[in-house]
Structure formats: structure tokens, C-alpha cells
Amino acid sequence: AQSVTQLDSQVPVFEEAPVELRCNYSSSVSVYLFWYVQYPNQGLQLLLKYLSGSTLVKGINGFEAEFNKSQTSFHLRKPSVHISDTAEYFCAVSPLSGGYNKLIFGAGTRLAVHP
Amino acid sequence: DAGVTQSPTHLIKTRGQQVTLRCSPKSGHDTVSWYQQALGQGPQFIFQYYEEEERQRGNFPDRFSGHQFPNYSSELNVNALLLGDSALYLCASSLGLAAHNEQFFGPGTRLTVL
């Protein structure tokens, strides 16, 4: 079984400041890792994903994440946030084996960017 | 190119009723998954359809059922509605069942059970 823990339910930050959203996961099998963003009253949009290779993954809107296998973490970072980054962010995993495409999500982190 | 579309946008039902939600996948996608997102929570996987068959199911009771049509669109049916079924229901589509394939999400259907 897999589980995802997002360590902060809310993260307030000022505009142009850096931000890190933390994500830890637990799994008995290898997984792919994802970060999704959800703007108010919208569906989820993929920010970035880690499948293999370099542990530093770059995504859209200036976000990046680093996969740390020993710590089973996949933290999301942005060096300078904008007001428009205010949204809910979800970390998710998908098991490699099983022959299906299933996402297991964390509870989410609400990022609030203040002027 | 239309993305994933869902209907209706909002729905209000009473306890014990039945509801059907609909989803059209992104053009070219053949796999549809359904997720339930309760208020303040992350989405939870309900089930996934491929080639008109349910391929994987999450921890949801049999009151939740689905269907996929030959044109890859899908329906989610919930019988005997409970107050706890109130949530945003998200449909996601992808090309095939490979775990690394990106899932594209629709805007969701907000179901309120009174």
C-alpha cells in the first residue's frame, strides 16, 4: 500500500519570497511521483513529475522538486513566488507495477501568497 | 482541442437518491479514472476504466459503479446517497494504463447531498 503525507496544511508567504512545500511518501513498491496544482473552482493541473534519472525535476511556472529516495521525500520549491501562485498543491504517487494508472494523493497544502 | 469535460457542474440531491455523473475524456485518450475529493482533502481514487472494463478499484462500496462507452466517455453512478457522499467528483483521462502516463483532470462535478 502507498500513502502520502504533506507536512504543512497551509503555507503563507510574501510575494517574491522563496517557498518549499514538503511531501513524504510511504510505499512497499517503487513509485512515480507527481505534484499537481488546483486553482479555485478548477480541476488539477500537473506541475511536474519524477519518473527516473536526475533527482531534480523542473516543471511549469518556475517550480522544481527534488526526489530523495533515502528520505522518501519529494519536496516542491520555487525561488520567488507570485500572487498568482496562490492555490492548493497536491503531492501524489503512482505505483510502477500493477498494470494500472492510479494516483494516491496527499491531503494538500494551501499556498497563500501575500503582497 | 477540448480537454476533459464533466457534466453537470453542480448537483443537489437528497439522501437515498441516485445520481449519474458524466465525463468526456481528452481527445485521443482511452482511459478514464474517477476521484472523490471531500472538502479540505486530497482526491481519492474510486475506479479506472479501460476498454469498457473496470480495471482497478479503490476502497469504495458497491454503491459506486461506473461505465465506459465505446467512444471512451464514462459515467459514475452512486446509489442510495449518503450525506458523506457530498464532494467534488473529478474525472481524469490518460492514454493507456501505464503508470507514468499523465492524467488530465476535468473541472469536476460538485455533488451536495441534503
Image (cartoon, rainbow, N blue to C red):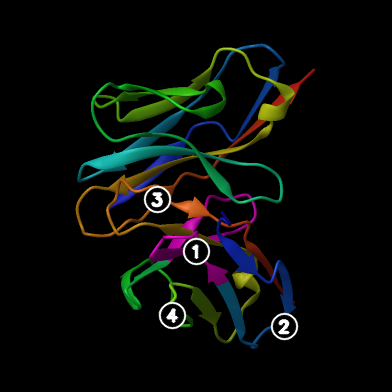
Residue linked to disc 3: A104
Whole-number angstrom distance, CA of label 4 to CA of label 2: 28 Å
Residue linked to disc 1: B25
Residue linked to disc 4: B69
Q: What segment is highlighted magenta in the picture? A: B23-46
Mark 3 chain: A
Q: Secondary structure at mark 1?
A: loop
Mark 1 chain: B
Residue A91 higher or lower than A85, as above or below: below
Q: Secondary structure at mark 4?
A: loop
Residue A52 position, x and y percent, is 24, 31
Mark 2 chain: B
Residue type for callout 3: Ile
Upstream in the sequence, badge 1 or badge 4? Answer: 1
Q: Is residue B31 left or right of residue A40?
A: left
Residue in front for this viewpoint, A72 or A90:
A90
Q: Residues within 10 Å of mark 1 (few under 14, many from 20)?
A: many
Upstream in the sequence, badge 4 or badge 2? Answer: 2
Viewer-nearest of discs 3 and 4: 4
Viewer-nearest of discs 1 and 2: 1
Residue B72 position, x and y percent, is 43, 72
Whole-number angstrom distance, CA of label 3 to CA of label 2: 29 Å
The verdict on a common chain for dots 1 and 4 is yes
